Image (tube, grey):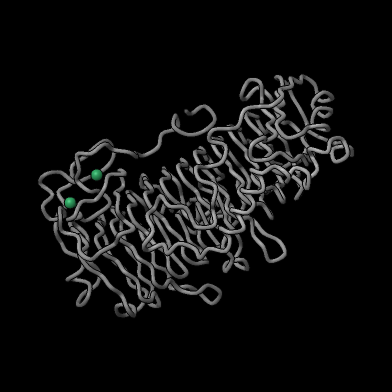
Amino acid sequence: LDAGSADIRGDAVDVDAPQTSGDARVDAARDAEVDGDMDAPLDPTTSACDRDPASTSASPPWGDPMPACIATYDVATQAELDARLGKAIAGDCIVVGDGTYAIGALDVTGNAARPIVVRAQHRGKTVIASGTLTTSAKTAYLVLDGFDWTTTGSLRIDGCDHCRLTRNRFRLTETADMDWIVLTNTNHVRIDHNEIGPKAHTGNPISIFGTGGAVARNTRIDHNHIHDLQTGGDYPSKGCGFNPGGEAIRVGVSGLAALSSATIIEHNLFERCDGDPETISTKTSDNVVRYNTFRSTAGSISLRVGDRGRVCGNFVFGGGKACSGGIRLIGEGHAVYDNYVEGVDGYALELHAGDPTHPPVANAVVVFNTFLGGDQSLYVGGDAKDCVIANNIFTAKSGTLIRLGGTAAPPGLVAMANLAPLGAAKLGVGGAPWTAAFLDRDPSFVLRGELSVLGPASTNAIGAAEGSYPAASVDIDGQARDDHPDIGADELSTSAIERSPLTPAEVGPGSP
Ligand SMILES: [Ca+2]
Ligand SMILES: [Ca+2]
């Protein structure tokens, strides 16, 4: 897809950015963005999980549905493709025949009503076998749909406004460590319904990055199947992957932590993502990680630095894998609710004390989760400040259920109405507030599919929640909590189940 032509800009006035902006819908969208940028971020402790960060004004996700093509062109050779891209204007759909192609600079400008769509004629049979995709600030509303990416290059998406990578397969050819898809200076990019992996070398399949004091914003990463990330490295004594820089998705770097990137990571399936102890690492603010499923993955959801994150409605099945973990929090104002974590090797929940370069967790609200841990379930750092841990279920198979980083309860901790049936484990802490806030009572789970949920006999959990947490208005199933909420991620309800753990058939290029 090497546009490779100097005449893109001069070929048609429609492609020139200022002229394109004459489209009323584009103007409206851009105005809305500017307005959205000026809104204060949502308070994660009071906003429901399905609300987007204030700055992501594109809802529903852009491209659902995709505007119709104004003109459709079939191409079957590299030369035809390059020629057509060289004169692409808003509303063009370019359908690329089976075969092998090269990618390069792609600076084309569509608009909200008339994107430029470059699509494989037969999904997966058009192979991007060489080259590196680059874009510039001129690129807007470009859609790449259905390609099989095997190139040794990468995707350097810079400056795109509303670009979309959809229903592709990414299995890039690696000869060294490399990031695959890197976003810089973008706004409203969507990466959806792709298959990503396997990946054998260190580096991020998806990196939300920034330059010059800015970070890519309002990215939506949804319905992808991300799997089989490398297991190299030498994590001490565990035999599992540990190569810093191998996160499945990395959002920012520490120097960008104060910036709002408002990334939404939702409805993705992660399987065997073993490249880094952090499967997802967010290093910016106002990010949302929701409704994803993680299986047999040697890492955790880590809000590594940055504030006001939301982690809600995720299913994590560690399968006992070494170095699998649940949710780790550092930074201020995070909200964690409606998550189901089971069978992880590390902590199911970690409220981190921070370190010399990362401030400790503060003002986190962790409510209505089910944490079924391995040897240990909950870690609370000594400097964790003013956090709430309420209405959760914690279990550990053995060992100590709770471990403290300090010698006493951290300052300002509000803990209440958690069920912590001990079985063969010890609570690990004593006195206030622990023994009264982590009750050795059986939730009397029943098995529904692979989930341990409440049943009619779950009297210790049903209606036993305390406090008011309006953000957690629906449970892990997407069912509404009633006026007497139940402890844990599940509310016992007869209403329809809206969400379940994801399977490969429900994500990726071939999914509905
Ligand atoms: Ca109830
Ligand atoms: Ca339920």
Q: Is residue 180 visible?
A: no
Which residue occupies the foreground of this view, 299 or 336?
336
Image side of residue 187 versus residue 352, left or right: right
Q: Is residue 300 visible?
A: yes
Q: Quadrant of residue 432?
A: bottom left
User: Could you tell me how many numbered marks the image carries?
Assistant: 0
- With respect to residue 393, does 62 lie above or below? above
- Residue 335 is situated, as x and y percent measured from the top left of the image, at 39, 62
- Residue 363 is situated, as x and y percent measured from the top left of the image, at 39, 72
Which residue occupies the foreground of this view, 153 or 80?
80
Q: Residue at x 52, y 51 (%)?
A: 241
- Residue 55 is situated, as x and y percent measured from the top left of the image, at 54, 57
Q: Can you say which quadrant of the picture contains the N terminus?
A: top right
Q: Quadrant of residue 493?
A: top left
- Residue 6 is situated, as x and y percent measured from the top left of the image, at 89, 39
Q: Residue at x 36, y 45 (%)?
A: 317
- With respect to residue 428, does 419 lie above or below? above
- With respect to residue 174, does 299 lie above or below? below
Q: Residue at x 27, y 61 (%)?
A: 399
Which residue occupies the foreground of this view, 276 or 484?
484
